[in-house]
Image (tube, helix red, strand yellow):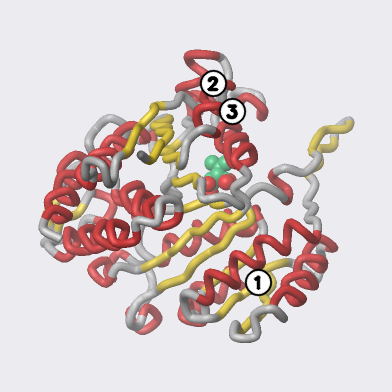
Amino acid sequence: MFRIALIPGDGIGPDIIKQAVKVMKSLEKPGEIEFEFTEVLAGGAAIDKTGHPLPQESLDICLQSDAVLLGAVGGPKWDTLPGDLRPEQALLGLRKALGVFANLRPAVLFPQLKNASPLKEDIIGDGIDVLVVRELIGGIYFGKRGREGDTAYDTESYSVPEVERIARVAFDTARKRRHKVTSVDKANILESSRLWRETVTRIAKDYPDIELNHLYVDNCAMQLIRDPHQFDVIVTSNMFGDILSDEASMLVGSLGMLPSASLGNTKRGFYEPIHGSAPDIAGQDKANPLATILSVAMMLRYSFDLTREADDIEQAVAKVLEDGYRTADIMEPGMKLVGTERMGDLVVEYLKCS
Ligand code: IPM
Ligand code: MG
């Protein structure tokens, strides 16, 4: 029995989580693969009910589960709240409490969605497959911040152990891919980046089979568009990873397609699509559930060792796209427009055929 804490959250969160649950239920086999779902309140929804973005009870349920699946949190409704009471605090609080320091964000171009990429065909070539490994519970997101008089400050700091562990995740992951790691920093300016670069270079000695190079973050942002094929695994800090992963997601067509997995030292993982809560289309059967469904595939692979089922989900998604079904965000002329529910049903139908 795998225990999953479900956080529908805000905006389109509930719409897409419903589809992900549908897909998981379709994989159940009594006595073999069984899921137990517990719904958890967090984000704006929790603020409305309890006054706090991450109630203790919600956190406790997540800490007792084998995996957490989150839809999305936030929305304009809560934008005027003070920083420490915003819905985003639920996300940061959960990541920190679960100790998930490594955020894996794969940007893969499904060949079926070639036209959705803004890049020219000769740059796309035979596809794009980049994995951003983002440090998730350190850096400027969690450093000392405050105000003094008319000045505000936020602090970027990294310790050697924090860099070592994320570097190891990047090198280990590159071993299962194309054996290349690009470490991204701003070592021409930031002391924390110089420590980052030194540490990554030292850890690389344990991985002689992996090719390592370093790029400054501004150069990396440019290179991702100029020639995405030079990248296999990109390892970087919390803030740079936040920015570069949004950029990478656009290269492959839609934010609505990209899943993510956040891992720590145990099998317990935190899974979420990388897109936001899109309040303008919430509850209208318009959201693309594929990023969340692909996040489920990552959950099955990393937390539950259900590799075959994970592959099956990814293949079912590819086949649904192959057969021309599209939600509005990835719609193109000549394709078949479907809503959130139908897209979830299609993945289930194709899974049954696999
Ligand atoms: C992300 C998001 C979050 C982040 C926000 C919502 C706090 O942008 O997961 O990329 O900055 O980490
Ligand atoms: Mg982001």
Badge 1: residue crowd in 10 Å (few <14, some 14–19, many ≥20): many
Q: CA distance from mark 2 to mark 3?
A: 18 Å
x and y percent of residue 338 in the render?
A: 15, 47
Given the image, on which type of amino acid does mark 1 rest? Answer: Ser
**Looking at the image, how many numbered discs can be counted on the residues?**
3
The mark found on residue 57 in the picture is: 2
Q: Quadrant of residue 45?
A: top left
Regarding residue 329, the answer to whether it shows in the image is yes
Find out whether the residues at labels 3 and 1 contact each other: C-beta distance under 8 Å. Answer: no
The mark found on residue 86 in the picture is: 3
Q: Earlier in the sequence, mark 2 or mark 3?
A: 2
Task: Please give the residue where the numbered disc 1 appears in the rendered image.
Answer: 183
Nearer to us of marks 2 and 3 is 2
State the SS at label 2: helix
Nearer to us of marks 3 and 1 is 1
Query: In this rendering, would 285 be left or right of 274?
Result: left
The residue nearer to you, when weighing 238 against 305, is 305
Point 38% across, 65% down: residue: 252
Badge 3: residue crowd in 10 Å (few <14, some 14–19, many ≥20): many
